[in-house]
Each structure stands twice: as structure tokens, then as C-alpha cells.
């Protein structure tokens, strides 16, 4: 059957105690079992490892050569077992999470804090970006999980998605729009601050305006979330953004979109062909528990 790790453990036990009976007691096996396994090891290696004298056990030259190697092999195996155990027990490991900018500052941040409290040894890597960018990174294997906005035309078939909640879009502005809610068609009268290509908010805005029969007028385009909100604060125009990103920005006002607005569903995505890591599974459980509490 070839050399086995257990045989090496038996050999080291005898080599260190220089006594078969004592070695058997130390490792919790019978002496016949110990003797048989070491004999099998010698047969496999084609060399005698121990001189079995009446007074004491001594090592042959082959035994002297094998002893440090056996100790190293056993140590490496124990280290591997310990490290794998740490990963399974979430004492170590890594979680690679992608999230849209609006979710990074709200849902993802709250769930990650709870995850960090529960599993402080797991290293967290977060990638912020638009849903389209995150989907590409996820399918390439660059992420374990991603919080994305489900597109109307469906997601990549290589991904498994779990809808989590609906998200409300509002018109963000640096001044009062003088109305309780805004129709999509009203946006033709405003300069828009627009996200860069790849952001799902850009596509959602353009598609909604297109269905309403007009092409929006851009004041500035190409920004990330913080830049877009900063441009709106500066009075360059208005922007369609999730209501949650306006928390902590007293200079901005939110005007709801009139029904039906722009429906958006937040979902958790992962690859179908990859078994989730223990860290990814644990994060999903914490995220779902957090949503249930909310």
C-alpha cells in the first residue's frame, strides 16, 4: 500500500522512546499493531530501520536518515490539518465581496461589521463598482460574492442570484424642485449629472428616459458615486440615485419619483460552478439575518 503517515508516527514514537512497549502506550495502540506497522514500513522501504536488541532499540543508518524526514513530514501534515481546520472553523480565510457604491455605504457595511465581529480572523476584501463590472469580475473568479442590481433582461447564466430587497430611486438636488414627486418625463427639463459607463444607474436612467420618449441632457458625466453627489451638491445638475446614499448629506434634497418609478432589485450573486467557501456561506447567513432584523 506504500508508506503511510501513521506508520511514520509509529516509527518516530519507537525511535524517541527506544522501546516498543513504551511507544505503544504513548500513542495508544497495542504492541503487536505497532510492530506490524513498522515491519510493513521497513518492507516498503526495503531497509531495516531499527536494531531490535534485548537491551534497547537502536536506529540503523537507514533509521537515522529517515527520522528527521519523518518528523518533518508529520509536522507538515499536522500544520496542514490545523490550517484547514482554521479555514473550516473560520479562524482564518478570506472573503472577497463586491458591492455597488450605494450598497457599500449601507447594506454591505452593516453586514460586514457583523461578520467581522463574528469572525475577526477572516481577511475581508471589498471591491466597489457598478453591477456590470462586478458581474464580470465575479464570472472571472475575482470575487466570492457580489451585491448587485438585477438587470431587467436577466443575469449571466453562469451566476446564481438571490433577490434580497427592493431599492427606491429619488431625484437628488441641491435645491427644492418645488414638487412632492417627479415624473420621469419631468427630467427632460433638468440637467443631469450622469455616472460613468458600466454603472447600472446610468443604464437605468437612460432606459427610463428613452421609454418616456426623450434623451436626457447631461451637465457632466463619467463620475463615481461620490463624484456625482459632489457635482449635485455644487449645483451642476440633478441625479437619480438610491435614497440610502443621501444619508449624512444635509446639502442634498431627495424628491421621490412618481409611481411606478424605476423598479430595482438588490440581489446576492455567486458563480454556479464554484462551491462557496466557508467564509462566503457564513457571510450569506449573516446578511440574511441582518435583512430579517431590518
Image (cartoon, rainbow, N blue to C red):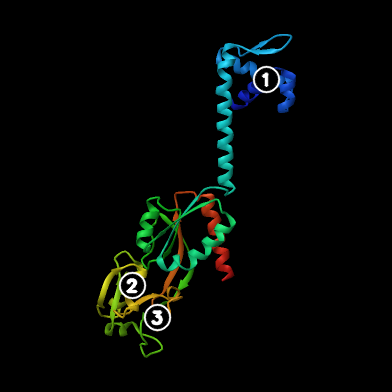
Q: Position of residue 133 (x, y in %)?
A: 35, 59
Please tell me whether residue 123 is drawn above or below residue 236 in the rendered image: above
Looking at this view, name the residue that lies furthest to the bottom. Answer: 178
Image coordinates for residue 271, horizontal then vertical, percent: 44, 53
Q: Which mark is residue 270?
A: none
Tell me the distance, in whole angstroms, between the alpha carbons under discs 1 and 2.
72 Å
Provide the secondary structure element on which disc 2 rests: helix
Give the image location of residue 148, x and y in percent. Answer: 42, 63
Could you tell which of marks 1 and 3 lies nearer the N-terminus? 1
Nearer mark to the viewer, of 2 and 3: 3
Decide: is 207 above or below 42. Answer: below
Q: Which corner quadrant of the image does residue 64 belong to?
A: top right
SS of the residue under disc 3: loop
Foreground label between 1 and 3:
3
Residue 153: image location, x then y, percent: 36, 66
Task: Say what secondary structure mark 1 lies in.
Answer: helix
Q: Which residue is mark 1?
A: 14
Residue 46 higher or lower than 155, as above or below: above
Q: Is residue 278 visible?
A: yes
Which label's residue is closer to the chain start, 2 or 3?
2
Q: Which residue is mark 2?
A: 228
Residue 251 numbered tag: 3
Q: Residue at x 45, y 67 (%)?
A: 105
Amino acid at each position: 500500500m506504500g508508506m503511510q503517515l501513521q506508520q511514520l508516527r509509529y516509527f518516530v514514537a519507537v525511535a524517541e522512546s527506544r522501546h516498543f512497549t513504551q511507544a505503544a502506550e504513548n500513542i495508544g495502540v497495542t504492541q503487536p499493531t505497532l510492530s506490524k506497522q513498522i515491519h510493513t514500513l521497513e518492507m516498503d522501504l526495503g531497509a531495516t530501520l531499527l536494531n531490535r536488541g534485548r537491551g534497547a532499540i537502536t536506529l540503523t543508518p537507514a533509521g537515522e536518515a529517515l527520522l528527521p524526514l519523518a518528523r518533518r513530514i508529520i509536522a507538515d501534515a499536522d500544520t496542514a490539518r490545523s490550517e484547514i481546520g482554521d479555514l473550516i472553523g473560520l479562524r482564518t480565510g478570506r472573503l472577497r465581496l463586491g458591492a455597488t457604491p450605494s450598497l457599500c455605504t449601507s447594506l454591505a457595511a452593516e453586514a460586514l461589521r457583523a461578520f467581522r465581529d463574528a469572525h475577526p480572523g477572516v481577511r475581508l476584501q471589498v471591491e466597489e463598482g457598478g453591477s456590470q463590472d462586478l458581474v464580470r469580475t465575479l464570472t472571472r473568479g475575482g470575487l466570492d460574492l457580489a451585491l448587485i442590481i438585477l438587470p431587467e433582461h436577466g443575469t449571466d447564466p453562469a451566476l446564481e442570484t438571490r433577490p434580497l430587497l427592493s431599492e427606491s430611486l429619488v431625484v437628488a438636488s441641491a435645491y427644492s424642485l418645488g414638487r412632492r414627486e417627479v415624473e420621469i418625463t419631468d427630467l427632460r427639463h433638468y440637467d443631469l449629472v450622469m455616472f460613468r459607463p458600466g454603472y447600472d444607474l446610468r443604464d437605468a436612467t437612460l432606459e427610463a428616459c428613452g421609454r418616456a420618449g426623450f434623451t436626457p441632457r447631461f451637465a457632466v458625466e463619467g463620475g463615481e458615486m461620490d463624484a456625482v453627489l459632489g457635482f449635485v451638491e455644487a449645483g451642476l445638475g440633478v441625479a437619480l440615485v438610491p435614497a440610502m446614499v443621501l444619508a449624512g448629506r444635509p446639502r442634498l434634497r431627495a424628491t421621490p419619483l412618481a409611481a411606478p418609478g424605476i423598479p430595482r432589485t438588490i440581489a446576492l450573486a455567486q458563480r454556479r460552478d464554484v462551491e462557496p467557501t466557508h467564509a462566503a456561506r457564513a457571510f450569506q447567513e449573516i446578511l440574511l439575518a441582518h435583512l430579517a432584523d431590518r
